[in-house]
Amino acid sequence: MKKSALLAAPALAIAALALPAAPAAAADSWSFQAELAPVNNSTAAGSAVVHVTGQEATVTVEVAGAPALFQGAPYPHAQHIHIGGQGVCAPPTADADGDGAVSSMEGAPWTGGIGASLTTSGDTSPASAVAIDRFPAGDAYTYQRTIPVDAAMVAALQSGTAVVNVHGADPAALSAAAQAKVNPMAPDLPLASDIPVACGVLAPAQMTVPEGPADTGVETAGTTAATNGIAGAAVLGLLALGAAVGLRRRVAGGR
């Protein structure tokens, strides 16, 4: 056998080490998060996380500082994901009627319409926008539920134009003019039940890169795949190199 053929095997094995590992297939899932800030002079705040997989989304909302009572009972706080607007929380200047509060209707050009009603049970479509018996209640709560999502919702999330609104203001904190009005979507309820008290824009969740030395045991899928690919190529290279050296020795001894 020619020397050039013998030398080719280790050369090919070494070249294999330089080949990048094949990337893992991208999963059909995305995560989004929002910080919920007080609006309409409220003290409510919190956070929202939406994790989408296929045609479902697991939604987690945490709220604190919201009005606690409504007509002597725990205050039910309607909460929605709005889509189709400018993708921002409505500013104070959206108060078109000058009653000192920005209602959902007044804020719609900024937040968009209701894409999903974050109810505790049953329907989650815009039809459940004022289903006050199926929303979390009280001054502080943690909500989590997996709900269906359509293409319009996914598109709004990916474009950064989906907005979370938590509703239910303290009637006593509103102006006399606002206290005299009713909820436009449920005329048997006061306007206070419609007023947003916390709002936030859902943005792609930031990936956290683990810190610390390499032996922490924390790995990402990409790192593991790349490491396994390089390790496999290294083993093949060493085997090929050993086989080539052994063959060269046998050829030389047989001369």
Image (cartoon, rainbow, N blue to C red):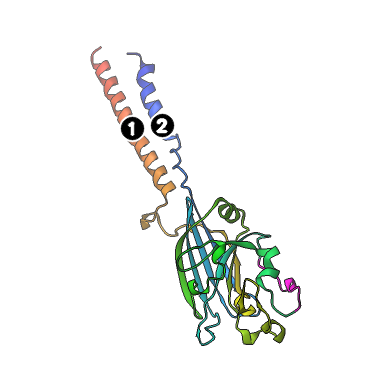
Q: Residues within 10 Å of mark 1 (few under 14, many from 20)?
A: some
Q: Which x, y percent locates residue 241? A: 33, 28
Count numbered badges in the picture.
2
Question: Mark 1 or 2 closer to N-term?
Answer: 2
Does the magenta portion include 43? no
User: Over which residues does the magenta segment extend?
Assistant: 89-98
- Asked if disc 1 and disc 2 are in contact, CB closer than 8 Å, the reply is yes
Q: CA distance from mark 1 to mark 2?
A: 8 Å
Residue appearing at x 45%, y 34% in the figure: 19
| Residue type at tag 2 | Ala
Query: 209 and 31: which one is in front?
Result: 31
Residue appearing at x 27%, y 16% in the figure: 251
Residue 163 left/right relative to 218: right
Residue 138 left/right relative to 89: left
Image quadrant of residue 249? top left
Residue appearing at x 60%, y 60% in the figure: 162
Q: Which x, y percent locates residue 60? A: 48, 66
Q: Which mark is residue 16?
A: 2
Q: Which x, y percent locates residue 199? A: 60, 70
Query: Which residue position holds label 1?
Result: 236
